[in-house]
Each structure stands twice: as C-alpha cells, then as structure tokens.
C-alpha cells in the first residue's frame, strides 16, 4: 500500500494530498530512510513523522486503503513508548513556558489601548 494513502487512512493528515506533500518535504521517514509518497508500506515498518511541531514514531500494525472512523484508524498503528514520553514532555514544556507576547510592555498599542486613549479627556475644554 502507498505511504501517502496509509497516512491519510490512519488519520495523520486530513487529505491524501497533504500527506503526499509532507512526505515530499522529507517530514516522513520509513525505517530511518527518506521515503516518497508511492513507497510501498508493510506491516511492521517503523515511521518517523511530524505533524506541525509534533514528532511521532509509530509502528505499522495494519493496512487500510479506506479512511474509517478514528478507533479503526488508531488500530492501524502503535506509537512507541519513547515517542509518547517525548510528546508528553514537549506538551509539559509548552504548558509551563510563558507566552513571549505577554512580556512585551511597550510597542504598538492594541485596539483596546487605542480606544482608551481616544476616550481620554475627549472634552478638554472647560467653562472655568
């Protein structure tokens, strides 16, 4: 079975063309080797892939040419324990890391700040 078809059927990518594009960019490796979208996949192969910033290592357990429901798709592969631990660690670091934009105190005012500035002492002229 083609690699891009399997990645689509296993629900790693939303469309087959996205799966083929990611394989073409070199973000998917089969058994440690760079692969093409038409690479023949077999049960037992080890895939290294990236979805956005998430790196995963999975072992192919089954093949399916159709995209079924999520539980059926999850039965097609098994994620390695090292990959699960690395994803959990990355999620924890992302949760604990402060948002860089929150530390910015100066610079261009936000829309809310501009509204506050516009309402500040709008009628400065006084009768006194």
Image (spheres, rainbow, N blue to C red):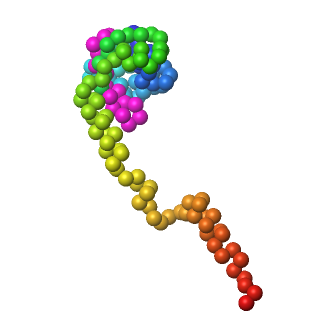
Image point (35%, 20%), residue name: 35
Q: Is residue 48 magenta?
A: yes
Image point (45%, 10%), residue name: 65
Q: Is residue 22 magenta?
A: no
Seen from the viewer's position, the closer of residues 98 and 65 is: 98
Observer able to see residue 92: yes
Image point (36%, 34%), residue name: 54
Seen from the viewer's position, the closer of residues 115 and 39 is: 115
Observer able to see residue 37: no
Q: Main secondary structure of the magenta part?
A: strand
Q: Does residue 99 lie above or below 80 as drawn?
A: below
Q: Does residue 104 lie above or below 26 as drawn?
A: below
Residue 63 location, quadrant:
top left
The residue furthest bottom is 128
Task: Tell me residue 105's x, y (percent).
Answer: 45, 64
Task: Tell me residue 88's x, y (percent).
Answer: 30, 36
Magenta residues, start to end: 42-56
The quadrant of the image that shows the C terminus is: bottom right
The quadrant of the image that shows the N terminus is: top left
Residue 53 location, quadrant:
top left
Task: Tell me residue 97's x, y (percent).
Answer: 34, 50
Task: Tell me residue 4's x, y (percent).
Answer: 43, 18
Residue 74 location, quadrant:
top left
Image point (27%, 13%), residue name: 44
């Amino acid at each position: 079975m083609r690699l891009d078809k399997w990645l689509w059927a296993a629900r790693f990518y939303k469309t087959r063309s996205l799966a083929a594009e990611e394989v073409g960019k070199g973000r998917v490796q089969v058994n440690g080797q760079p692969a093409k979208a038409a690479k023949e996949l077999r049960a037992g192969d080890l895939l290294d892939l990236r979805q956005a910033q998430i790196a995963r290592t999975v072992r192919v357990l089954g093949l399916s040419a159709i995209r079924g429901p999520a539980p059926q798709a999850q039965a097609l592969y098994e994620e390695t324990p090292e990959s699960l631990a690395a994803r959990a660690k990355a999620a924890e670091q992302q949760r604990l890391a402060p948002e860089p934009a929150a530390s910015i105190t100066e610079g261009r005012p936000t829309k809310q700040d501009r509204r506050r500035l516009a309402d500040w002492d709008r009628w400065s002229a006084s009768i006194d």
